[in-house]
Image: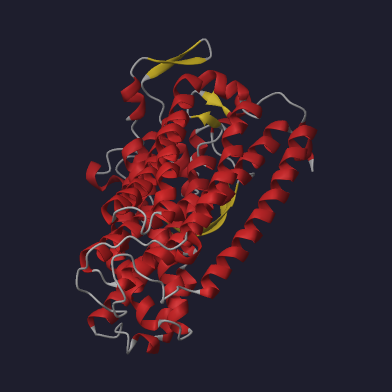
Amino acid sequence: MQFLTDTVVLSRIQFALTAIFHMLWPVLTTGMAIYLVIVEGLWLKTRNPDYYRHARFWSKLYVLNFGIGVASGLPMEFQFGTNWAPFSEAVGDFFGSILGFEGAMAFMLEAGFLGIMLFGWGRVHPAIHYLATIMVAFGANLSTFWILVANSWLQTPSGGEMVNGKFIVSDYFQAISNPFMVKSVSHMFFATLETSLFVIGGISAWYILNNRHQEFFARSLKIVLAAAVAVTPLQIYIGHLSAEQVAHYQPTKLAAMEAKWETSPAGQPADWSLLALPDEAGQKNKWEITIPNGLGYILEFKKNLSEPVRGLKEWAPSDRPRMVGLIYYSFRIMSGIGFFLAGLMLWSLLQWLLGNLSPEKIGQQKWLLRTWIFAAPLGYIAVESGWIVRCVGRQPWAMYGQIRTADAASHIPAGNVLTSLTLFAVVYSILFVSTLYFGSRIIRHGPNLELPVPGLDDQPAMETEPATFIPDQRPAEAQQ
């Protein structure tokens, strides 16, 4: 229990708690916003009321996640001033401005158009409403961009140098376009989109499996499946490129990801560890299952094995990541989920091509639907695991190679941090349970398939002909 008196450890645990909790919500909103753009665009093109009702139904889950994301995100940023003041003082000129861009550009853009997206149906022209939905999606994903710019810069600092303990920016745009930025932003973008697709698909499968609105949710399942055909293989490929980047810029993290203790010299392909039990005290793996030469060929194929693959023993214990087992298995969980989701996509695509996802037959695909339900939370687990690899693997550096985590923490009593940590744990637990409760209520209640459609004057439920826009003059309560 010695960690209870260590300010740095407690501050790290507190930041990890707030980050892990907060990340659950924007992961869904950034991807689901794109889905809302798709279904609303399909409604405008076809005037099929099903697409309109999809937009209305899924936007309820969107706004629930948005609200919890805001509530949980603000305390996380305030910790840079309370728990990590020396760090903020050292890098604030750049890091602080990037977080400011995220709030002023992205969050305000998303929040500003959110009201029109939610309550503008029938009050504004459909084109204006669609523009609002696009702006919400753009703002949500712009937020992801700025957050990943900030974090990537901590992974590969560039655009300036440390002078007397403070980072002085000489090239602002070089700092933004740091070596990790492009692949990190791309990897996270597809991660949020993939997570959202399988959440929407899993919820749709639950309705179909329970014989509720089968035709309606067969449509949403096909939409996410069509998107997943492109997203899942791209995510695996970008993940591979990111791992190659880690090998080049952060070899200590790569060694921890692979629980590799000994160096494989140039010209000798390194074995790839499939499973292992790392022993940090003994600087070895107690047991492991390896694929001979696997890691070397994966990482060094294009370089003709011209570089060694360095093991953890190349660095002093104080200069390499701890919790190697956590990093090692987090990476495998993330990668394994990525391949599992790609496999589910292929299975589903095959059933679609065979005609088994038609409204008449889709209910018979019991195991496929159960697998989609099982897959719904896996994207969250993969994203959280990826961030564990990214941030725990960066240790012992808060800013890689420049500022140690131990030097970045504020000098405040450990008891104060323990108190705030406990309060965060309690409040976030309440928020989590409340979100699950209200989210389950939305799902149990289901979509309102009798909801009047703006622009359609008493048309049949499956009317597809274009109609003149007719503003909805009813009170807002009736439109909901």
- Quarter that holds the N terminus: top right
Colour scheme of this structure image? Answer: secondary structure
| Whole-percent x, y for residue 4 in the image | 78, 39
Quarter of the image for residue 84 reads top right
Residue positioned most to the top: 164
- Tell me which corner region of the image, top left, top right, bottom left or bottom right, holds residue 82: top right
Q: From the viewer's perspective, is 427 left or right of 368?
A: right
Specify whether residue 460 is in view.
yes
The percent coordinates of residue 90 (x first, y second) are 53, 19
- Can you name the residue that lies furthest to the front here? 473
How many marks do you count on the picture? 0
Question: Can you say whether 153 is above or below 312 in the image?
Answer: above
| In the depicted structure, whether residue 394 falls above or below residue 274 | above
Residue 171 place in picture, x, y as percent: 33, 18
In the rendered structure, the answer to whether residue 317 lies left or right of residue 99 reads right
- Give percent across and percent down for residue 386: 47, 50
In the displayed structure, 196 sits above or below 298; it is below
Q: Name the one closer to the observer, 386 or 33.
A: 33
Left/right of residue 88 with respect to residue 227 in the rendered view:
right
**Which residue: 47% across, 67% down?**
376
Q: Is residue 283 visible?
A: no
Q: Is residue 372 above or below residue 397?
A: below
Front residue of this view, candidates 186 and 72? 72
